[in-house]
Amino acid sequence: MSSRRGLTGLGIGVAAAGAATAAGVATDRVLRARRKDRAVPRPADDPVLEQHGSVVVADDGVPLYVEIDEPGDRDDTATTGAKATTVLLVHGYAHSQALWAQQRRAIHDAGYRVVSLDLRGHGRSGEGDDASYTIAQLGRDVASVVEQAVPDGPVALVGHSMGGMALMALAEQRPELVRDRVVGVALISTSAGGLSEVNFGLGKQLGGVVHRLGPGAVARADRQQNAFNAARLLGRNVESALVHRYSFGGPVPRDVIRDLAEMIFGTRLHVIGAYLPTLMEHDREAALPAFEGIETLIMHGTRDRMTPIAHGESLGRALQGAELVVVKRAGHVLPLETPELVSAQLLAFLERAERSTQDEEAT
């Protein structure tokens, strides 16, 4: 294998999905594989939407898939009593709302109304124009979800990775919505900017190569999406090792790695490539003051290779009064690596937000 092709595979792996998606798989075998491209059904045509989910229409017409858990709407759990606050869960780059499965159940069981979103181009949501794959547009999408799926009452926003960046974009664009409706914001494994300096644990020189090759490598692989998918079957061990390396900081069950890999590879490669520039350009530290005065939680792992711990510490300094939880020996995808801890921290955060709201109403 040539060094350039090896770096191209690495560029795809590190850049795509924020979790080392396809490195080592999109190499010579991908380029040699020959499969006719098949159309992928649009999520809006999926009958599952009508059975189990709802559609929020974004400001540019893209259908966004959401699922809503009303307090007490499941027979298999006992809810503790309905709370006033709705919790909106926003996943990260190349993931889906499935990321939140354990937190979603814990929050719902505590009595909260829960709204889970698939970002545009992810999961069961529709695809937009490539030019729409920006963090700014994601901020507008979150606003659309709040307005259509949470039309009244207090709301707490929870974002992982790019989902947290989308919440910053919302604060930048709609500070009045944050001021009037939002009672809390949780930012998990995310950043206010400076991702173009991240070397993914590869060292400065090789990290720079990945930044340069990543977007182009993803774009080239997208032209043979089905060949790329076929090559995955030949390199499951490599794929799992790389997903583990860039997503987690320590041992996790094999099925957790596989579930995350399916989320990542469920995202079309051209979507992954289209989002890369906005991640590198993201700079919203100036928007953070919009969160002042509301309950704020920051969680970050010390072994996060995608958004290193310095990004979480920077958020903690910028958001005075925020609760900063540093998770030792944990990586980027905390909701899957330390699910019980994330659930417990979110529940404590929501209780603080509820108390703050009640105190304000009492005065």
Image (tube, rainbow, N blue to C red):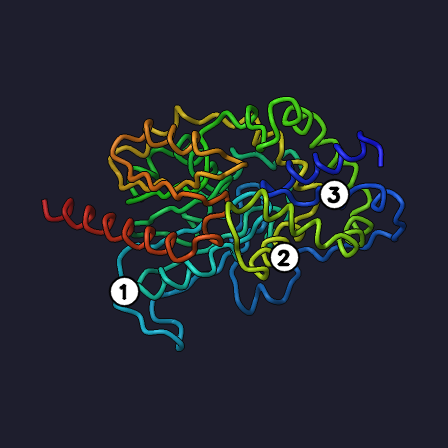
Tell me where residue 12 appears, x and y as whole percent: 70, 38
Identify which residue is drawn at 75% across, 34% down: 217
Identify which residue is drawn at 38% across, 28% down: 314
Q: Which of marks 3 and 1 is nearer the N terminus?
A: 3
In depth, the one of 148 and 271 nearer the eye is: 271
Identify which residue is drawn at 53% across, 42% down: 59
Tell me where residue 225 appears, x and y as whole percent: 78, 48
Q: Earlier in the sequence, mark 1 or mark 2?
A: 2
Q: Which residue is denoted by mark 1 in the rendering?
A: 82
In depth, the one of 179 and 100 nearer the eye is: 100
Name the image quarter holding the N terminus. top right
Question: In the shown orientation, is residue 344 left or right of residue 248?
Answer: left
Pointer 3 with pointer 1, Cβ within 8 A:
no
Q: Quadrant of residue 284?
A: top left
Name the image quarter holding the C terminus. top left
Q: Is mark 3 on a helix, strand or loop?
A: loop
Tell me where residue 304 appears, x and y as whole percent: 49, 39
Q: How many marks?
A: 3
Q: What element carries label 1?
A: loop
Q: Quadrant of residue 178?
A: top left
Q: Which residue is denoted by mark 2 in the rendering?
A: 44
Q: Which residue is denoted by mark 3 in the rendering?
A: 24
Could you tell me the amino acid type at mark 2?
Answer: Ala
Which tag is nearer the camera, tag 2 or tag 3? Answer: 3
In depth, the one of 262 and 27 nearer the eye is: 27
Q: Is mark 2 on a helix, strand or loop?
A: helix
Reply above or below: 130 against 347.
Answer: above
Q: How crowded is mark 2: few (under 14 residues within 10 Å), some or many (20 or more)?
A: some
